[in-house]
């Protein structure tokens, strides 16, 4: 199996981008707080080229843990108690328990109005609104924090403050807030090249939130391309052996997002991806993305060859993804292979190997009995 495939089950640190075990709570290289998704993997994407977006979203950018350890739990517990255990809505001020939550929210907002860089209050506000999937309501306060930090004299800015803001917005899925705060953080550490890549990832994600082909989507994609280029101008395959190729692929995706529906020039996109496959021939995503770009350019025979090569360098999940695209090009039914997309544990290592008996979710494996792992009961009724 390729080098790229062998690290697929690992989580990547958002700060130094080192690979870590999926159950790791802290980066083994730099100590950043880790919080990976299942197996450190993302689901197959429907877009022509995939965003290699870091799954890890809780950051420690400057000296120790950014997250205020007790605040999220306290905020969530207080809110759930006030709502009678229902975290899905904030009732109005009609005499019920929702009034307590609204009072808490107003207190935190008042603190942020007074001091936009009160990260403890920002943390609490995110905790409350994220629990009802309305983290975007905190975005104005995050943007105000960024503005307040930027207005400070450059030599007196506290990097940890803006790092905290970036961590909170990223953790809670606030793309707009995260993009703004990471851009500001890049000024605090201009030589932290992985931050440049993260800003590019955020803008590329934002471009895909918008309608394809819209002016806003194109503008965000252009920002992503620019930030990726900053990284590529400063980094190298030697200094960032995995991240470099991910950024090269993502930049190609950002370029494609800006292309017109007709008469598009694919030369630079194809040059990027051809370089990725030539200089890193075991890189599955390079081959897969190259095939998809060739398909978009109307070069179907070359696309078939590239996707066939991708299948030789991927994990079962990756091979399955390339096979789906290859089958469409060849007008045939796809080979199911060894990956079952209907199995929620497909592609995961349920043994807990390397993780102290943990599952890829970072939780103790409930089926583990000492050193023995019985047959996975979740496989019943599924293929494989």
Image (cartoon, rainbow, N blue to C red):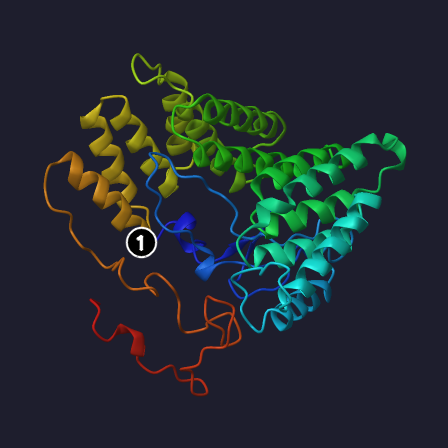
Q: Residue at x 25, y 37 (%)?
A: 307
Residue 14 visible: no
Q: Residue at x 25, y 28 (%)?
A: 295
Using the image, determine if residue 253 lies above or below residue 158: above
Q: How crowded is mark 1: few (under 14 residues within 10 Å), some or many (20 or more)?
A: many
- Secondary structure, mark 1, is helix
Q: Which residue is drawn at 73% across and 53% down?
A: 106
Using the image, determine if residue 44 lies above or below residue 384: above
Can you give x and y, in whole percent of width and height, for residue 384 in the image? 22, 67
Q: Label 1 belongs to which residue?
A: 317
Q: Is residue 164 left or right of residue 382?
A: right
Q: Which residue lies furthest to the front in this view?
A: 94
Can you give x and y, in whole percent of width and height, for residue 8 in the image? 43, 54
Q: Which residue is drawn at 41% across and 18% down?
A: 268
Using the image, determine if residue 31 lies above or below residue 16: below
Using the image, determine if residue 230 lies above or below residue 364: above
């Amino acid at each position: 199996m390729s080098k790229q495939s062998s690290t697929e089950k690992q989580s990547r640190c958002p700060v130094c981008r080192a690979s870590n075990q999926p159950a790791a709570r802290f980066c083994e290289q730099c100590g950043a707080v880790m919080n990976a998704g299942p197996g450190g993997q993302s689901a197959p994407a429907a877009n022509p080229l995939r965003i290699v977006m870091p799954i890890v979203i809780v950051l420690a950018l400057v000296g120790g843990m950014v997250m205020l350890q007790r605040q999220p739990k306290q905020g969530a517990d207080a809110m759930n108690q006030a709502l009678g255990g229902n975290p899905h809505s904030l009732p109005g001020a009609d005499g019920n328990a929702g009034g307590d939550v609204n009072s808490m929210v107003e207190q935190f907002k008042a603190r942020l109005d007074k001091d936009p860089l009160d990260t403890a209050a920002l943390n609490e506000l995110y905790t409350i609104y994220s629990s009802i999937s309305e983290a975007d309501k905190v975005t104005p306060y995050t943007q105000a924090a960024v503005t307040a930090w930027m207005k400070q004299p450059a030599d007196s800015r506290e990097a940890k403050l803006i790092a905290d803001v970036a961590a909170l917005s990223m953790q809670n899925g606030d793309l707009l807030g995260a993009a703004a705060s990471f851009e500001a953080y890049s000024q605090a550490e201009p030589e932290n090249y992985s931050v440049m890549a993260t800003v590019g990832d955020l803008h590329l994600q934002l471009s895909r939130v918008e309608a394809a082909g819209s002016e806003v989507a194109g503008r965000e994609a252009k920002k992503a391309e620019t930030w990726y280029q900053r990284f590529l101008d400063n980094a190298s395959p030697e200094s960032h052996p995995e991240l470099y190729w991910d950024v090269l692929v993502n930049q190609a995706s950002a370029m494609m997002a800006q292309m017109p529906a007709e008469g598009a020039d694919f030369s630079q996109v194809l040059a990027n991806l051809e370089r990725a496959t030539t200089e890193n021939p075991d890189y599955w995503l390079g081959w897969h993305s190259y095939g998809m770009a060739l398909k978009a350019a109307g070069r179907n025979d070359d696309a078939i060859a590239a996707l066939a090569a991708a299948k030789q360098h991927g994990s079962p999940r990756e091979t399955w993804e390339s096979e789906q695209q290859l089958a469409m090009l060849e007008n045939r039914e796809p080979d199911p292979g060894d990956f079952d997309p209907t199995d929620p544990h497909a592609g995961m290592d349920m043994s807990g190997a390397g993780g102290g008996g943990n599952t890829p979710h970072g939780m103790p494996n409930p089926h583990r009995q000492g050193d023995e792992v019985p047959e996975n009961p979740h496989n019943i009724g599924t293929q494989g």
